Image (cartoon, grey):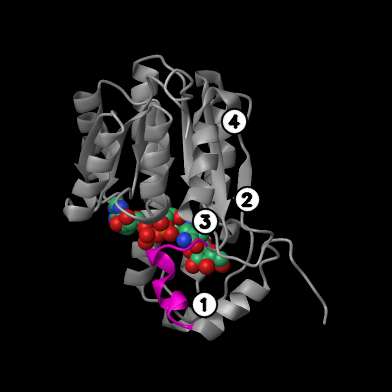
Amino acid sequence: MATKGSMRLDNKVALVSGGAQGIGRAVALRLAQEGADIALNVLHDDERAASARAEIEALGRRCAVLQADVSQVAEVRAMVAEGVRQLGRLDVLVNNAGVEKRADFLDVSEAHYDHVMGVNLKGAFFLTQAFVAHLKETQRPGKVINMSSVHEELPFPHFTAYCCSKGGMQMMMRNLAVELAPLGITVNNIAPGAIETPINATLMKQPALVDRLLANIPLRRLGQPEDVAGVAAFLASAEADYITGATIVIDGGLLWNYSEQ
Ligand code: NAI
Ligand code: BGC
């Protein structure tokens, strides 16, 4: 943790979507530790949201809890306006909210497809649009960080809608990196591998599946939310000013592991 006086994100305000648990919560806390005030988007304004807010405030930072379903464009626009109203401005956006559903391709319903694409891709698309409109209006630079996945690249059979959403996020990031550069806005993806969060709760209850997964990870452990949070803090900081259009993989070597035996 950075100490006071050397905080990389002093005077910055960051909006983190899906911030009540898992990776989003770890990212929000880490950005706060680095000096940022936090607009914490949550799907439900419940006790997890309250405890995340309390942890952020205990670090001496401001925190606005913003309830919104990111798949609903009107809610997303209202949320950005409310974040600006409460915290004065936004400088950093972390598109973290995401859902994952398993189904054989032939069993994917329209509701399954719409839910996964609506949260993971449409949500990030229109939240970024509202954030960029705010930056443009106030003539300030900013940083967009998307929580993608190794599955923006790597097939994940039985999770096709999920992979479509993350593959779409890869091209959204590359397009916007080019289109928004004249506004001084950088856009990058983080591609985690297997991180121990509630999204993997079903997997974690099946030791045989965990062992098979670990056998594919050269570093032989699951990632922790904090492994991801440090990279998000770096990408949000001035140290990453010349990085745009990039995906940073955090996967213990999973993506490029291949062995014939
Ligand atoms: P998680 O299930 O703990 O967190 C997801 C968060 O998104 C929750 O706080 C949830 O409330 C929020 N969310 C879901 N629907 C929402 C909506 N409609 N509006 C607003 N918020 C909503 O899972 P985790 O692991 O923390 O996932 C965070 C991101 O990281 C996701 O985008 C996921 O795809 C990505 N990721 C996770 C990996 C992992 O192994 N845990 C690996 C690669 C990517
Ligand atoms: C998924 C996890 C999975 C990991 C590695 C992530 O995108 O959310 O469920 O364990 O990729 O396959």
Which contiguous range is marked in magenta?
195-206
Residue bearing mark 4: 178
Q: Are circles 3 and 4 on residues that touch, CB within 8 Å?
A: no
Q: Secondary structure at mark 3?
A: helix
**In terms of secondary structure, where does tag 1 sit?**
loop
- Mark 2 residue CB less than 8 A from any atom of ligand 1: no
Which residue corresponds to mark 2?
Answer: 249
Q: In the image, what residue type sits under mark 4?
A: Val
User: Which mark is drawn over residue 158?
Assistant: 1
Marks 3/4: CA–CA distance: 19 Å
Label 2: few (<14), some (14–19) or many (≥20) C-alpha neighbours in 10 Å: some
Q: Are marks 2 and 3 in contact (CB under 8 Å)?
A: no
Which of 63/176 is in front?
63
In the rendered structure, which disc, 2 or 3, sits on the residue that comes first in sequence? 3
Which tag, 3 or 1, sits closer to the chain's start?
1
The x and y percentages for residue 21 are: 33, 55
Label 1 – label 4 distance at C-alpha: 33 Å
Q: Secondary structure at mark 2?
A: strand
What amino acid is labelled 3 in the image?
Answer: Lys
Q: Quadrant of residue 235?
A: top right
Q: Residue 166 got which mark?
A: 3
